[in-house]
Image (cartoon, helix red, strand yellow):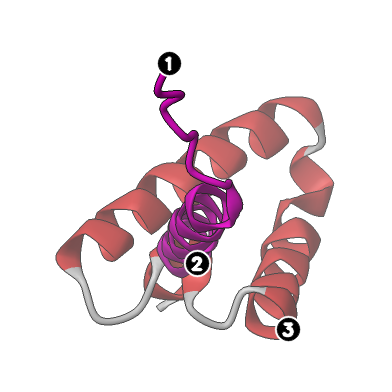
Amino acid sequence: MIWVAVGGRGTLVGAALGALIVNFAKTWFTGALPEYWLFALGLLFVLVTLFLPKGVLGFIDKLRRKQATSDIAGNGAQPAAKASGG
């Protein structure tokens, strides 16, 4: 369940991404601070639930959409150059 929550709900890619992130974190924590791994896992789940309700994949999608809308707004706001007839 934590893989899907971290990676992103509703897609297989999100679950796979979550699995990679959680397993990397587990590998790092069990090597560096093995007694705190379960606390870190719980904290990760709580933080993702609070701040990334659609997971990492949903956050990336949100950033892409925001970038696309700012690109459109940025291009539309520039005045068109007039050709000088001389």
Figure check: 66 above or below 32: below
If you read the primary sequence from the N terminus, does the residue marked by circle 1 or circle 3 appear first?
A: 3
Q: What stretch is highlighted in magenta?
A: 57-86
Figure check: 57 above or below 53: above
Mark 1 vs 3: CB contact within 8 A: no
Q: Is residue 62 left or right of residue 78?
A: left
Q: Is residue 7 visible?
A: yes
Q: Is residue 32 left or right of residue 68?
A: right
Residue at 41% across, 62% down = 61
Quadrant of the rendered structure where residue 50 is? bottom right
Q: Give the residue number, with chain letter if any, for mark 3.
A: 50
If you read the primary sequence from the N terminus, does the residue marked by circle 2 or circle 1 appear first?
A: 2
Along the line of sight, which residue is nearer the eye, 54 or 32? 54
Q: Give the residue number, with chain letter if any, for mark 1.
A: 86
> Between tags 2 and 1, which lies in front?
1
Q: How far apart are marks 2 and 3 (CA)?
A: 16 Å
Instruction: Residue 57: give x, y in percent of width and height.
Output: 41, 61
How many numbered discs, if any? 3
